[in-house]
């Protein structure tokens, strides 16, 4: 059985807000003394200030070789967990056990110095990350090759592009061979090929089963691809912890609920000539019931009510399904179906039937565009007009394998024919 | 405390690398480079020679004023620049402190180490000046490394205290240059110790830098042993302040990342 390398026991981290508000000079001295000396934050409480828990009563543990993802909205306390693990801050209450060498891939290149060359920075950053000079020396060529910076290694890094900078930082960090690797949102930099290389490297490290990874990201695809277990953190508390698929779908549902509370804001982002106004957009299932959660392969109906002040000939209604990061996945255009709309005048309704949604487990956005057939005029464009989530698969037989889930699902049949002759 | 020191030793490579970074980055993209380490105390020496020797006629006995003042301006510059770089070293490296753990005293120590190198470079000029002014040396000159160590110990103490406090109170940033200016005038840097009125002398010598500066002159310029009373006082105060400052530093160390 692999051993436990990280253990959080009822960990809380409290910050006292308004720390700097001294009420006059008489308060000043006792406060500074308190502030510097005081380790027991409880004895230093001010009714006016109020306390803020970055983490509250968080417990979990990780075994060697596991990869744990941490997801949650901004300010949930994700980075606080990483800082506690990196031992740069101490918990207010609770106990943290972390075994072995911990390497933090937090904000790449934090230890770089602009005036120094790439070579000098590799030695500097390497030693900050805990490598010995001899080890850096041995790994030097491999680091440079990974960063693809052979030509620029003796150039001061202030002349580097931000991609080169990030590549160098990641290349060093990945060569540290830690027991625990902390990754915070750093892989969003660098071009696609380099990012791919980084993830391949992370998968390679994980496959050896020695290194434990804690991965914080807003990129749910990456969390799904890398981690078998996920924590959903919200306002300092663990909302859910468990299998990636369960936690992620729960996370999407929750985020969707939260987003619907802010719906009025979305309306402001419309543009167009205004000759056509979309009065409402709604999502329903095949039976016409208004829902916003679907299963893969189920049907969805998007209903748009419009009002056109004057007659508009051959308008084009486009229904777009996007990922939450804005990638267009599906675009259904009335102009390119057999049921083209000849003209609109006054109010009316346009429905789009999506049959058998080929989407996976995620949150999606529906955007509506009403324009001319040639695409030159937008009468009304309403990005992010509605949202829905895909919660789970209809096909319960297939186990959910996050690493291989892809972006969309298509019914596929796989046949096998062996050429081996059976004797 | 011993276990802390052992831990720093295990991080010696990091210490060396950060020291090298501090040295390299200071003189990169400057024309004169490390020559600045000499120019700074030299120009101070010239201006003080003009003011104190030519205008005010401060008496320095047989010793010419330029070498008299350079002998103390050199270690004083080391002290002043050490504090100037070491005290803000933690907040200047805030991005590292919030992200990666290693003993935080590495930063002030590295800043002082980098200044020590400047001090040694500027010391070369002092050797030439001694030849120029035909200064005879005695065996007492071997006290110099010991006095330098006392000075470093005292500097470390102030640096640990200052760099820790500045994390919580940025006011320290403005106190440092002001404090150093005032401090220089209550230390026998540009004038000899014997012009201090006798009734203030014991209070004057509570300042360890006074005992240290006086000792440099005694062993290098006057071929005397250091004044045991003054130097002893400096040693005791340096040790106590170093110990207190280091304990304070370690006590608040884990709060740095929260406060930066």
Image (cartoon, coloured by chain):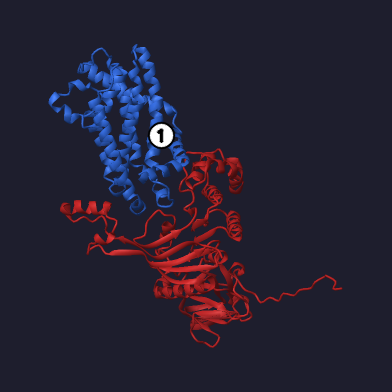
Chain colours: A red, B blue
Image side of residue B69 versus residue A171, left or right: left
Image side of residue A174 versus residue B63, left or right: right
- The residue lying furthest to the bottom in this view is A287
Does residue A104 appear anywhere in the picture? yes
In the image, residue A334 sits, relative to residue A155, either above or below, namely below
Residue B96 x, y percent position in the rendering: 42, 48
Residue A118 x, y percent position in the rendering: 53, 41
Q: Nearer the viewer, residue A218 or A90?
A: A90
Image side of residue B172 versus residue A272, left or right: left
- The residue lying furthest to the front in this view is B2
Residue A262 x, y percent position in the rendering: 40, 73
Instruction: Give residue B60's quadrant in the image.
Output: top left
Total count of labels: 1
Residue at label 1? Answer: B114
Instruction: Give residue B159's quadrant in the image.
Output: top left
Residue drawn 23% across and 14% down? B61
Residue A285 x, y percent position in the rendering: 53, 84
Q: Nearer the viewer, residue A362 or A145?
A: A145
């Amino acid at each position: 059985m692999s051993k436990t390398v990280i253990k959080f026991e009822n960990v809380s981290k409290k910050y006292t807000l308004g720390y700097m508000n001294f009420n006059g000079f008489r308060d000043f001295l006792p406060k500074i003394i308190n502030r510097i000396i005081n380790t027991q934050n409880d004895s230093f409480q001010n009714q006016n200030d109020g306390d803020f828990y970055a983490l509250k009563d968080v417990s979990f543990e990780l075994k060697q070789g596991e990869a744990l993802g941490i997801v949650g909205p901004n300010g949930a306390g994700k980075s606080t967990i990483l800082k506690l693990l990196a031992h740069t801050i101490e918990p207010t209450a609770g106990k943290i056990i972390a075994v072995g060498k911990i390497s933090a891939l937090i904000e790449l290149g934090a230890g770089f110095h602009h005036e120094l060359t790439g070579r000098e920075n590799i030695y500097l950053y390497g030693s900050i990350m805990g490598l010995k000079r001899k080890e850096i020396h041995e790994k030097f060529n491999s680091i440079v090759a990974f960063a693809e910076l052979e030509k620029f290694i003796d150039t001061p890094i202030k002349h580097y592009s931000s991609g080169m900078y990030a590549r160098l930082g990641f290349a060093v960090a990945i060569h540290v061979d830690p027991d625990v690797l902390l990754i915070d949102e750093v892989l969003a930099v660098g071009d696609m090929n380099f990012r791919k290389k980084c993830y391949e490297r992370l998968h390679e490290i994980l496959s050896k089963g020695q290194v434990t990874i804690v991965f914080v990201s807003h990129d749910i695809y990456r969390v799904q691809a890398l981690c078998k277990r996920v924590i959903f953190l919200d306002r300092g508390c663990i909302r859910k912890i468990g299998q990636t698929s369960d936690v992620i779908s729960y996370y999407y549902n929750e985020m969707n609920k939260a987003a619907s509370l802010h719906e009025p804001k979305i309306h402001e982002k419309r543009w167009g000539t205004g000759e056509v106004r979309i009065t409402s957009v709604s999502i329903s299932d095949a039976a016409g019931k208004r829902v916003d959660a679907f299963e893969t392969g189920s049907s969805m109906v998007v209903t748009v009510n419009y009002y056109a002040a004057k007659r508009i000939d051959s308008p084009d209604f486009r229904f777009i399904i996007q990922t939450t990061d804005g990638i267009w996945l599906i675009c259904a255009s009335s102009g390119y179906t057999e049921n083209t709309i000849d003209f609109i005048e006054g109010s009316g309704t346009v429905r789009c039937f999506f049959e058998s949604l080929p989407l996976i487990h995620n949150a999606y956005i529906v955007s509506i565009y009403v324009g001319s057939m040639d695409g030159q005029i937008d009468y009304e464009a309403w990005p992010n007009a509605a949202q829905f989530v895909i919660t789970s698969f209809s096909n319960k037989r297939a186990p959910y394998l996050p690493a291989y889930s892809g972006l969309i699902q298509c019914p596929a049949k796989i046949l096998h024919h062996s050429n081996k002759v059976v004797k | 405390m011993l276990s802390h020191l052992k831990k720093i030793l295990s991080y010696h490579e990091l210490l060396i690398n950060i020291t090298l970074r501090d040295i390299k980055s200071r003189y990169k993209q400057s024309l004169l480079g490390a020559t600045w380490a000499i120019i700074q105390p030299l120009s101070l020496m010239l201006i003080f020679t003009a003011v104190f020797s030519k205008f005010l006629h401060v008496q320095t006995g047989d010793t010419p004023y330029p070498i008299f003042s350079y002998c103390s301006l050199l270690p004083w510059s080391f002290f002043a620049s050490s504090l100037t770089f070491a005290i803000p070293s933690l907040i200047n490296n805030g991005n590292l402190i919030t992200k990666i753990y290693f003993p935080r005293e590495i930063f002030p120590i590295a800043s002082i180490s980098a200044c020590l190198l400047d001090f040694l470079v500027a010391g070369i000029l002092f050797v030439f000046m001694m030849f120029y002014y035909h200064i005879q040396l005695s065996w007492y000159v071997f006290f110099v490394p010991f006095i330098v160590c006392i000075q470093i110990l005292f500097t470390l103490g102030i640096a640990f205290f200052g760099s820790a406090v500045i994390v919580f109170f940025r006011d320290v940033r403005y106190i440092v240059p002001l404090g150093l200016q005032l401090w220089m005038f209550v230390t026998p840097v540009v004038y000899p110790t014997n012009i201090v009125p006798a009734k203030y002398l014991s209070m004057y010598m509570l300042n360890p830098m006074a005992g240290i500066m006086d000792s440099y002159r005694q062993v290098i310029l006057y071929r005397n042993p250091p004044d045991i009373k003054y130097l002893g006082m400096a040693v005791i105060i340096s040790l106590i302040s170093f110990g207190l400052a280091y304990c304070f530093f370690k006590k608040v160390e884990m709060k740095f990342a929260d406060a930066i």
